[in-house]
Amino acid sequence: MRHAGSAADDWPQREVIPGGNGLLQAHASVPAATAPREAPALPGASSRVSTPLPAPAPGPAPAPAPASAPKPASPPERRRSRLYVIDALRLGAALLVALHHYAGTFRVDRPDNTIWGRPVSDIMPGVFRIAAYGWIGVEIFFVISGFVICMSCWDRRPRDFFVSRVIRLYPAYWFGVVFTTVVLTAYPVVWGRPNTREAFFNLSMLQSGSHVRNVDGVYWTLWSELRFYLVFLAVVATGLTYRKVVIFCCTWGALAAIAPVAGLPALSLLADPDSTWYFIAGLALYLMHRFGQDLLLWGILGLSWLMAQNELARRIEHVEHVSGWRGALLIYTLFLAFMAAVALGFTDRVQWKWLVTAGSLTYPFYLLHYAAGTTAIHYLHDRVDARLLIAGLIAASLLLSYFVHRFFERPVSRFLKRGLTKAFDQLGAPSR
């Protein structure tokens, strides 16, 4: 054994003796540090004469330590320019939803409805058949939201994520609540006059969680968006990586799958089985865009498609009542295929900068078009051709959305960003 602190703390070494026939083992009792050593006396030679032994030949160099196995890492990232096609898809989805609300819902196809006065399928049968599928624009919104949120949050702190969501959601929404409340208060014939208390509560965007009526029916989607932001914030707080987002998709999807049978309201609230799989599809598509395709991401996307097709059927059966499952599934499948092409770079050549402005109109347009637009149809449908009326309302809503974005949303967003950033700085919010 080795003894700590001993002069003979080195292990015995082997020495080569010139003229010898090999290697001579040094005795373990001889200190390895003794020098010089004397050669054994030769016959006839004086024992007082000694020749120092040559220095021991160096032993073989130790084999390099095997490199530790590399830790699993994210696939290499692929840098790409701005995806202008996403802006076009967002606007297209908003236009689909507006067309559906004006000319394709079950409400507007009922006899003696307060919007058109008679079934819209009698007025515009061709337009109705197309508009009946426009509701799927909401599902398209959810997929795009998963893609864009993951993209915008990469390498950002939780405080940045919070600030970006507040300035993106609230300014245009506040304008929409006030605008719609004023319109419906002045012209309550279609939707009724909003309750003042409910209108104030709507400014929080939390009315669905408190069972308070939405001032405008389209606000229901914002509750799904807020829940997605809440659960995804847990991943943003730890720093987004390929592995973490994949684990999040699998975990959140599993919770959404068991939520309907678990009987736990809190689980259903966070898992949100009605929209979870659309957001997951968007997350998987963004990982394809950033890191390239692989079998795992295709598997997540495929599973989201399987779950979504069942959700589409439930929505048609319980809410829409005006379209078919096969047609809805075909539209959604074609959209996912196109999104996959976008994620893999097949549309990178589309660099039309005006699409950025078009995309910026999507959110205010979505918030403003429904209640006010259907109220306008009630008063104008007997005076204007139905198709021209719908086209004119969409154009007017887009124009109003531009002014809201340019003169209200952007200034208020800048003000909120400065104020919230300063507040977080004063709190000394730690970096992740």
Image (spheres, rainbow, N blue to C red):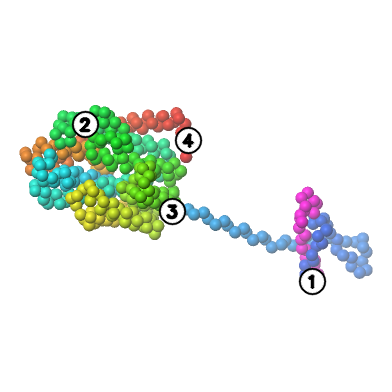
For disc 3, the marked residue is 76
The residue at 74%/62% (across/down) is: 57
The residue at 14%/44% (across/down) is: 108
Q: Nearer the viewer, mark 3 or mark 1?
A: 3
Which disc is residue 194 wearing? 2
Is there a contact, CB below 8 Å, between mark 3 and mark 2? no
Q: Name which of mark 3 and mark 4 comes first in the sequence.
A: 3
Which amino acid is tagged 4? Pro
For disc 4, the marked residue is 430
Instruction: Please check the rendered image and state whether residue 127 is part of the magenta-colored stretch, yes or no.
Output: no
Q: Name which of mark 3 and mark 2 comes first in the sequence.
A: 3
Tell me the magenta residue range. 1-20
Q: Residues within 10 Å of mark 2 (few under 14, many from 20)?
A: some
Please provide percent x and percent y for residue 276: 34, 48
User: Who is closer to the viewer here, 376 or 321?
Assistant: 321
User: Who is closer to the viewer here, 298 or 273?
Assistant: 273
The residue at 12%/51% (across/down) is: 126
